[in-house]
Amino acid sequence: LLGADRRRLFPDDMAVLLLFLAAFLLYAKSKYFPKALQGKTEFLRRTPWMTRAFGYSLVLVALWRFVDAFGGFTGTMLWLNALILAFGVLIISLHIDYNS
C-alpha cells in the first residue's frame, strides 16, 4: 500500500504547505500575534496544547516527507530552509499595516 503509490497520495510539495499551516498554528498562540486577527483565532488560543500538538505534528510530517523525497541530509536542510521561510513569510505578512 505504501509502495510506489505513496507519492501520489501525499505529494512532496504538500510538505511545504504543511509547514506554512504549522507555522500559522504555532504563531497564532504567540503573544506577538497581531491584535486585529486574534478574534479569528480564539479557538486556537483557548486550546494551546491541542494547537501545539497539531502544529508540531505537521512539522514532523513535513520533515518526514522532505527526508523521504530528498534523502537524510539534503531533506533535513531543505526542511529547515522551508521552515525558516514559512515563519518569515508569515510574520512579515501578518505585521504589514495595510491601512496606512
Image (cartoon, rainbow, N blue to C red):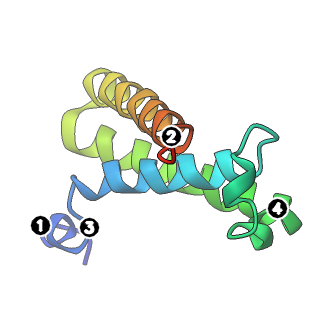
Q: Residue at x 18, y 67 (%)?
A: 3
What residue did someone put label 1 on?
Answer: 4
At mark 2, the secondary structure is loop
Q: Residue at x 44, y 34 (%)?
A: 83
Q: Position of residue 56 (x, y in %)?
A: 63, 49
Q: Nearer the viewer, mark 2 or mark 3?
A: 2
User: Depth check: 49 or 36 in front?
Assistant: 36
What residue did someone put label 3 on?
Answer: 10
What residue did someone put label 4 on?
Answer: 45
At label 1, which amino acid type do we have? Ala
Direction right: furthest residue: 46
At mark 4, the secondary structure is helix
Q: Nearer the viewer, mark 4 or mark 2?
A: 2
> Are there few (<14), some (14-19), or many (20+) residues within 10 Å of tag 2?
few
Badge 1 or badge 4: first in the primary sequence: 1
Badge 2 or badge 3: first in the primary sequence: 3
Q: Is residue 30 left or right of residue 7?
A: right
Badge 4 or badge 2: first in the primary sequence: 4
Q: Nearer the viewer, mark 1 or mark 4?
A: 4
What residue did someone put label 2 on?
Answer: 100
At mark 1, the secondary structure is loop
Q: Nearer the viewer, mark 4 or mark 3?
A: 4
At label 2, which amino acid type do we have? Ser
At mark 3, the secondary structure is loop
- Quote the CA–CA distance across marks 1 and 3: 11 Å
Q: Residue at x 36, y 25 (%)?
A: 81
Q: Position of residue 29 (x, y in %)?
A: 77, 51
Badge 1 or badge 3: first in the primary sequence: 1
Say whether marks 1 and 2 touch (CB < 8 Å).
no
Q: Nearer the viewer, mark 1 or mark 3?
A: 3
At label 3, which amino acid type do we have? Phe
> Are there few (<14), some (14-19), or many (20+) residues within 10 Å of tag 3?
few
